[in-house]
Amino acid sequence: MSRSIVRQSKFRHVFGQAVKAEQGYDDIRVSKVTWDSSFCAVNPKFLAVIVESSGGGAFLVLPLSKTGRVDKNYPLVIGHSGPVLDIDWCPHDDNILASCSEDCTAMVWQIPDHSLTRPLSDPIVVLEGHSKRVGIVSWHPTARNILLTAGSDNLIIIWNVGTGEPLISMDDHPDLIYSVSWNRNGSLFCTTCKDRRLRVCDPRKREVVAERLAPHEGIRPMRAIFIRDGNIFTTGFTRMSQRELGLWDPTNFEEPIALLELDTSNGVLLPYYDADANMVYLCGKGDSSIRYFEITEELPYVHYLSTFSSKEPQRGMGFMPKRGVDVTKCEIARLYKLLDKKCEPITMTVPRKSDLFQDDLYPDTAGPDPAMEPEEWLDGRDEDPILISMRDGYVPPKSRELKVAKKNVLDSRPTTRRSMSALDTNSLPVSFGHVEHTKLDLLICSFSQK
């Protein structure tokens, strides 16, 4: 008599559960922009959601504790003059958020610890270097103040936010860039593009070090993310428009490690990766389900675990960093599902009877401290994330002010959007200040002679 052997895994029984209605966020006018980003970003302090707004682009930032109905007059972040397309929290400072927009700029914001009392319209720094809309922002995982932006001008720019200057510019993509993902130590990033190529780029050498044509044969958009061991996980479509996922070794792109067909649907699958559990959560735009898989070194390498389903389709999704989950409830992941008018947190839990800390579920995870400075990274240094223990949970530190010291304001900001009449005396160019001092010196001299 043969017995089917069940694969042993501590994540085999992970289950998803939506929180109670009063623990969600209601009356949020989620953006209707036709752009395949997640529209949502979350960290242990804040939830940020791109929303509909008149007269430009805006997004909403709420402290996680501010659950329930959101006041219609709740102040928004409103600096962009066009619709906001993507947002991303800084991994090294829970109060710093980057946004990008159809107005061809990216902006970096300092969010106060308390709830906003009035609309926030002054970013810390405006990053101007793209000639068309900017659709992707992504922070470097280990270096302080390094931000990547990708635009519809097919350009990738890597910035030092601390000085407001572009460090690296890459124009290797001949068409629209669909996604960008850093590897674990930030030495490489991978991209997917409308030309149907998956590329691995070394930004400091300014070159593409590996590429694969059509990892998925369909012409619809692909997504790719680096996983912990350096392999690349992709989602895309077959020639018959079936959704498909793949696992690739970037040192040998000839054959996939694994290739699985899922279903027939139009929604692009957005992958969210948990490096500690080596799990991937797939959320399709317009789907009402979240599938999750475990990646291992055993055949078939990508193991389907389960599906969380609900009634309403999702407009976007936010993924909480591991340091923001509740270790006392064996919660290994939390996703924030955007619906038409609300945001619904979904917890992913491993069922355990013991109330003690589960060491096997919570290895040391990436903490909020950067491993190196931007100059060190630019000089070729690579460092893995600085890890912290989750044994006692994680308490977010208080806000630290990000100071931007531009080396040469006139070079990095060639044009100004403010008229001369709106400028105060402190912001006048040096030459103007010099003229005023000269007049004053002449007056003092003539007075002393009299």
Image (cartoon, rainbow, N blue to C red):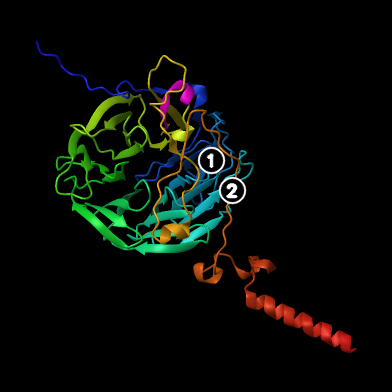
> Which amino acid is tagged 1?
Val
Residue hosting label 1: 61
Q: Are marks 1 and 2 in contact (CB under 8 Å)?
A: yes
Visible in this render: residue 82?
Answer: no
Indicate the quadrant where residue 2 lies.
Answer: top left
For mark 2, what is the residue? 120
Relative to 74, does residue 413 appear above or below in the rendering? Answer: below
Quadrant for the C terminus in the image:
bottom right
Report the side of 344 relative to 304 (left or right).
Answer: right
Q: Earlier in the sequence, mark 1 or mark 2?
A: 1
Q: Is residue 98 visible?
A: yes
Q: Position of residue 206 (x, y in %)?
A: 32, 63
Task: Decide which of 156, 190 is in the foreground and name it.
Answer: 190
Q: Which residues are magenta?
A: 327-335
Label 2 packing within 10 angstroms: few (<14), some (14-19), many (20+): some
For the N terminus, give its image quadrant. top left
